[in-house]
Amino acid sequence: MRTQTFTLKLTIHFILAIVLLSGVPVFAAPPADSPDAPTLVLAVLPASQNLDTALQSARSAGIRVRHIFPPDAFIAEVPSGTPADFPGAKTFIAAVDPAVTTEWSPAAKRAAVVFNALLAPPITARDAQSLDAHPLQPGDFVDALEAPAPEAPRFLNIENVTADDLRPNYTESSQFMIGSVAVGIIFPESDGTTDPSTEDWTDGKQSLVVSEISSALNWWAEREPAAQLSVVYDTPHTEPTAVEPISRPYTDQSLWIADTMTALGFSGYSYFDQVRAYNDYLRQTYHTDWAFTIFVVDSANDSDNRFSDGYFAYAYLGGPFMVMTYGNNGYGIGNMDAVATHEMGHIFRALDQYAAANVACDAQSGYLQIENQNSQQGCAIDEPSIMRGQISPYANGQIDEYARGQIGWWDSDGNGMLDPVDVGLTVSGVTTQTVATTGVFTVSGHFAETPFPSPKYRSILINSVETVNYRVDDGVWQSVQPVDGAFDDYQDDFIFTTDPLPNGTHTIYLQTIDDFGKVNEQAIATVTVSGVTETVDTEFSAASERLTVQSAAAEPVAGTALQLTDGIIAGVAYRLDGGEWQPAQPADGAFDSAREGFTVVLSDSLSPGDHLLEARATDSFGNVDLTPARMTVSVQAAQFRVFLPLVVR
């Protein structure tokens, strides 16, 4: 269990002496006004183009997708030096003129409004300070609430889960702020049935709300790139209710939330379960890790922009929803982003820190159960933070380390991985099959990532393995092909066949790399080869095992292949860095004798740095050299001299 004595390890990133590297761009994390800052790009797809395919293509190119508006638009951050272009899409890097969006889909129009809002200048520190005099909540109201447990029987038995149930379930809709999240925005609209209707939503007001909410979500995404936060927006819904929400106390939310959820088609034993069902629908529909709902109550005609009991913004810790009013107690629609940012912290289990909330320093929250040691109760630290509310922390991008920990943004071992996605690996059911006289092994089994444990909640994970490799002893990693066509889950079966191994005992290792970059390696088998007669030998001609060149294509690498008994050399193959074997060239034009010279011509596009070159011969009987020749080829970067002009005065 974490305590205030836990020391957060700080990682300082720096880049020294950046030189031209054969045209390969190097990216850092520059300030927003830096020439090397990422470019914010709006992409609008034609009806014929699939959104998922376009998103996958963007991510494969190293482009971070921030906001997604199904079915045809998204906003992404494109690194400096990468073309701000998506094939077939209309792309924008400057504010979009509304006149060009008239034929666009509703989702694309919303994306344009959000895009323009994200490009707008942020609130200044001076303006933020002037608004900070406004109270976060009148009196001693607390805006972080606890939702009741689900009442639907089919969701009560969640403790008895199996090892195959490690994905977040129906009740775990926002356990830590990492990965992808689907957001539903609901606009309750009174129909005058029970209460007089005093408020009426308009398209303009709703567009402002969506842009403010998107700015809040973007604020969180910018605070921690390692969280890889991306947001999918469901179509906002304006749904009828018999009451006028703003004229009632917040506790009457049971009436208008039940009305709107029923109108939207979601049922349940309670209105909380109705919202949970909607969140679950969002998560399943958009294939996200998390989902939550935002209810925004119109208060444009209300004198104080608060419910009748004084509340105006609140959220439930860990979901399933948060509530805001249009005017937010006088902060105004222009500062809804700051209010929404604070409430979103609660959605992912961050606690209040402002004095009136009276939350103790040792109160623990979040998947990692981190204490609240920045609460204004005389705690371990006293820093401005978004969880203290007000506008300045939003304008200044401030969040303290304890609030970060409560939403899952702690790296307790300093390895560069946020704890909730710093997962382990188990490998089971490993079998090895071989033909003893060849030294070739077929290895199969099952791997599964294991969650970072939660001290309080069920241990879960959101990672998915994308790459699997194997190696023998200290050899190079070689790729493993998926059994079912793709590695796309945290667990899967694997099978691979080794190259021929020489006599002796060998250790086989498995490596997995997932979508958060977590690399796990594990020894999975020990095999012994005996009785293999080695009849072929391969050697490089160089006296040293390291060859340093200015260019990989500067000169061929020469070697000799020998058949040690009574056959002839039939061929020589080479590979680089554990890649595919390729044919080497015979020195005399043909492989047709017991002793053959060969050459390897390397590509001139080989990147600067060290590369492992291997070569192995095969004889006319099909015997393969079990101990390939190995050499390190060190390609040096191009050197540039700068001559300064000589100025004589």
Image: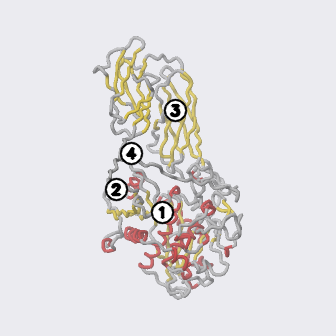
- Identify which amino acid the numbered label 1 is placed on: Val
Q: Nearer the viewer, residue 283 or 507?
A: 507
- Identify which amino acid the numbered label 3 is placed on: Val
Earlier along the polypeptide chain: callout 3 or callout 4?
A: 4
Mark nearest the camera among 2 and 3 is 2
Q: Nearer the viewer, residue 309 or 564?
A: 564
Asked if marks 4 and 1 touch (Cβ < 8 Å), the reply is: no
Residue 115 on image: x %, y %: 40, 68
Q: Secondary structure at mark 4?
A: loop
User: Are there few (<14), some (14-19), or many (20+) residues within 10 Å of tag 4?
Assistant: some
Q: Quadrant of residue 592?
A: top left
Residue at 50% x, 22% y: name it. 502
Identify the residue under disc 2. 83
Residue 585 on image: x %, y %: 32, 25
- Residue 269, can we see it? no
Q: Which mark is residue 21?
A: 4
Earlier along the polypeptide chain: callout 2 or callout 1?
A: 2
Identify the residue under disc 3. 443
Colouring rule applied to residues: secondary structure
Earlier along the polypeptide chain: callout 2 or callout 3?
A: 2
